[in-house]
Image (cartoon, rainbow, N blue to C red):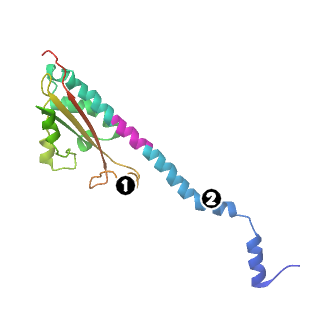
Amino acid sequence: MRQTGVRGLKRRFARCRSGSSAVEFALVAPLFIALTFSIIEAGYFFFAESAVEAANAKAARLIRTGQAQTNAISRDAFFEEICDVVELFGDCNERLTVDVARFASFAELAADVAEPVCRDADPDAVDDIPYEAGGARDIVRVRVCYMHKSFNPGLGLNLQKAADGSVKMFSTSIFRNEPYES
């Protein structure tokens, strides 16, 4: 016996299961896709961060072993050593800063609480970034700031960001130069 009217229509609608998979997929798919892209973005972020760390370590070794000093590697050439590794992620002239400072003692280094300068700073501050490779047995700090532009603005909510939304990646190497011969 076929039910008619509004009551019958409601009962038939409640029993009907065709199309429920499509509705469930439509509800779950956007969340799944967002999660998938966030995982990919997080992996890319950590890959870029490890590249910045590796570039800093590689370039700092040139100073620590005296190669930068004995071969007269300039500020621009040292910048290019780091840029060669991180340029895969964007234009170095718009995103990268390298600060090399010499200190007479570890106490002097500990007293220096200045923030690293990144590309979003005042252009005069960026131009005044030091490059002091020091001599044999000097204490040197190499700081790199790379501004990574994220695809997903929700990623890294507690990371320091620039005004344009770029995430600031910092890498620091502190060491005493080896007693190399000049």
Span shown in magenta: 43-51
Q: Hey, which residue is sitting farthest top in the picture?
A: 181
Amino acid of disc 1: Leu
Query: How would you rate the neighbour count of disc 2 (Cα within 10 Å): few for under 14, some for 14-19, many for 20 or more?
Result: few
Which is more foreground, mark 1 or mark 2? Answer: 1
Residue 95 sits in quarter: top left
Task: Tell me which label, 1 or 2, sits earlier in the chain.
Answer: 2
Circle 2: residue type: Phe
Q: How many marks?
A: 2
In magenta stretch: residue 8: no
Percent of width and height locating residue 42: 43, 45
Task: Please say if 119 is above or below 5.
Answer: above
| Predominant secondary structure, magenta span | helix
Rendered-image quadrant of the C terminus: top left
Residue 49: in magenta span: yes
Tell me how far mark 1 sits from mark 2, CA to CA: 29 Å
Name the foreground residue: 128 vs 174.
174
Q: Is residue 153 left or right of residue 77?
A: right
